[in-house]
Image: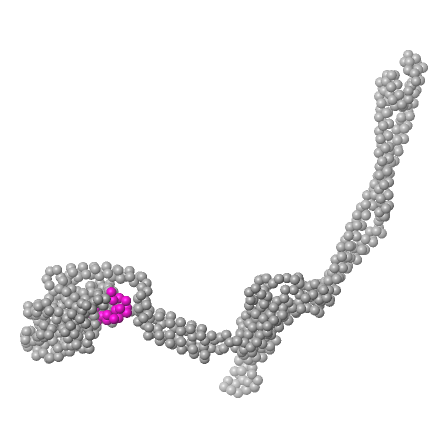
Amino acid sequence: MNQHNRLVADGSGSRAADLAEDDDVVDIYSILLALSRGRIWIGAAMVLGLAFGIVWAEFLSTPVFRSTATIKLENDETEVAGLPSLIGNSNFLWNDALMTTEVGVIESYNLAEKLAVELDLMNDPEFNPFLVVEGEDDAGGGLFGRGAQSEAAEDIPTEDEILYEIASGLRRQVYVTNPEWSYLLDISVIDTDPDRAALLANTLAELYIRDQIEVRFERTREAKNWLSDETVALKKDLEASSSRIEAFRANSDLQSEETLEALNFQLKTLRERVEGAERDVQMLEDRKARLVAAQASGSIPQQAAVLQEVTGRSLGAEIDESSPASVDAFERQFAKAMQDTDTRLSRERDQARTLRASLDRQQETIDRQSAEYVELRQLEREAEADRMIYEYFLARLKEASVKEGFAQANARVVSPAFEGMQIAPNSPAIVTMTTFIALIAGCGLVLLRDRFNDTYRLGEALENDTGLPVLGQIPQIPGESRADLISYIVEKPSSVPAEAIRGLRTSLQFSSFDAVPQTFLVTSSVPGEGKTVTSAALAHHFAGLGKAVLLVECDVRRRAFSEMFPTPPKHSLLSVISGEAGLLESVQSHTSLGIDVLASAEPPANPVDILSSHAFGCLIDVAREAYDIIVIDTPPLLLVPDARVVGQYADRILFMVHWDKTRRAQVRAALAQLRLGGLSPDGLVLTNIDTKRLQAYGHGERYGAYSAKGASKYYEN
């Protein structure tokens, strides 16, 4: 690869990086374009989804009906004969928790089981698949005989298991809802039979109310039994309390309240007397102490003063201490006073002790009476409490006996269920759903198909995948045959395809900074990629520069030149190689194209051997001397090795890739074949580009301005 190709390759790497960066961004416009291209597939998918939805809704689905019974929960319980409820508060408000609880009760397994038993669903074949139809069990013959029947009978579940399955199935059919801000419960039952749905809903509502009555009756009976047991026990407690009071009164000398008050009055009087006696004793003791103190002093005047103070009497005349008779008389008087004081003190002490003993006995008696009286009052209060409790329970027991036969539910049916309304299948919803799913699936498949496309739509993608520059991008050339395609190029030199070929020629002219390339080899990976027409068109445009151009057909096996140039040549490529004729006398000159053509003929030997011969190399050398430009058309690389052989003589190798057709794996494999021969393409050409589809893919701006607005002013199409 020359310096120019390396520069182009570097540029392609930059463009590939930009492309990769663009691929990381979600292109909504490209997605919409991809969906637009696949609209037929999407439409077909939607039609299939619509048809499937109609068949499913109308023929495959089983109709389902819903019937609803409405019950109202009462806020209070009607009193019987003015008696309050025994099992709870008769006046309460339903809250969310209670409403949710009642919903759970209605949807419970117990009610579902009662419903199955009430309607005898065990004998309904639609609910009991194990039900043996009358007459079938008598058929002893058949394909398997009685032995098979006995084995099948072993697999039949028990009645309890069957009942459990039926009740579980009924629970899945029942839905209970509570309308907002109401005491109503809607009991809805779903079934395949509209009448049976109504029957199930009404029966379930009745069973719920009946269950409430049974529960209340059972609770009332339990309350009555409990009250009866408690009343008997309380009666025994009351009798025991009364017995304790009687026994206490019999074993104690408890006085009446009046007697106890008299004793308290006596105690008060006696306490006052004791206090007076004790004061007298104290006074006498003080007097005696003064007398003793005076006597001990030995002072006659002091003794006289104390004696006068104690006795309270005057001595009359003063005592003459010098007179023995006067002193003796005073001493006798003082001793008498001492004796009288001792006598009186002794008497007062005895009296005080007697009064104190009487007081203690009286106090003990009163304390004992008070304690016994308090204990009696306690026993009487306990007996009174037992009596009150006993009377209360006895009254409640009588109430329970009265209300036992009047148990009532706190719910009633306000709207019975009627023939069920069909709720499924919802044909419009099913058809809409299947059509929408089909739409999504169709869009997904179209996008996946577009995402995993294995062909080349962008020149940048081709460069990024191969590492080689794209020298030309040639749009589709109108025409049916190769001759028509060449005629279009010749007759409309200003058309878009002609300008694209001219652009390829320009790229090849400036692909080298040194010598101008002279020999160009054109090849591809598989047939049908436009290499032959591109070779002829490229040769024609080189001739337009005043160059002597030779177009050589080396696709010896296919010989496609005969379609473009119908006039059979006198000599061919094989004639020159074999030496039958010279190069100049073997070529055909086509004035319309301005080129000489060296066509091929039926090979007498293997074409690879012919093209590998020394004579073919000499032919190329002679052609180089006689012509300015040599364009060689070769077979596809993946079919035969001819192109690898001829490539040894080429200055430039052009590799054709069909737009949106040639697979990436084919391109990689063909390039690998070239590398095995020590060759590498100098450039790639993206051929047969459909400009209309370019716009549909949203990549038209990446292929030049051939389809841009105003481009028609520059081209003649």
454 to the left or right of 395: left
Tell me, yes or no, if residue 54 can be seen here. Answer: yes
State the extent of the magenta-drawn residues as a range: 686-701
Relative horizontal placement of residue 167, taking residue 540 as reference (left or right)? right
Which residue is drawn at the image coordinates 77% and 57% (left, top)? 387
Indicate the quadrant where residue 40 lies: bottom left
Q: Quadrant of residue 237?
A: bottom right
Query: Extreme top residue here?
Result: 322
Q: Residue at x 79, y 58 (%)?
A: 239
In this view, the residue in front, 510 or 371, is 510
Q: Nearer the viewer, residue 178 or 104?
A: 178
Q: Quadrant of residue 318?
A: top right
| Left or right placement of residue 139 versus residue 628 in this view | right
Observer able to see residue 672: no
Quadrant in which the N terminus is drawn: bottom left
Task: Identify the residue shown where x is 84% and y is 24%.
Answer: 289
**Above-or-below relation of 251 to 39:** above
Q: Position of residue 131 (x, y in %)?
A: 56, 80
Residue drawn at 6 percent across, 69 percent down: 626
Residue 228 counted in the magenta span? no
- Color theme of the render: one colour
**Residue 518 picture location, percent across and down:** 10, 66
Query: In terms of depth relative to the viewer, which is nearer, 48 or 551?
Result: 48
Give the tally of numbered discs.
Answer: 0
In the rendered view, tell whether residue 345 sits above or below residue 670.
above
Task: Locate the C terminus by quadrant.
Answer: bottom left
Q: Position of residue 348 (x, y in %)?
A: 88, 31
Q: Position of residue 184 (x, y in %)?
A: 58, 67
Q: Is residue 692 magenta?
A: yes
Which residue is outermost to the bottom? 141
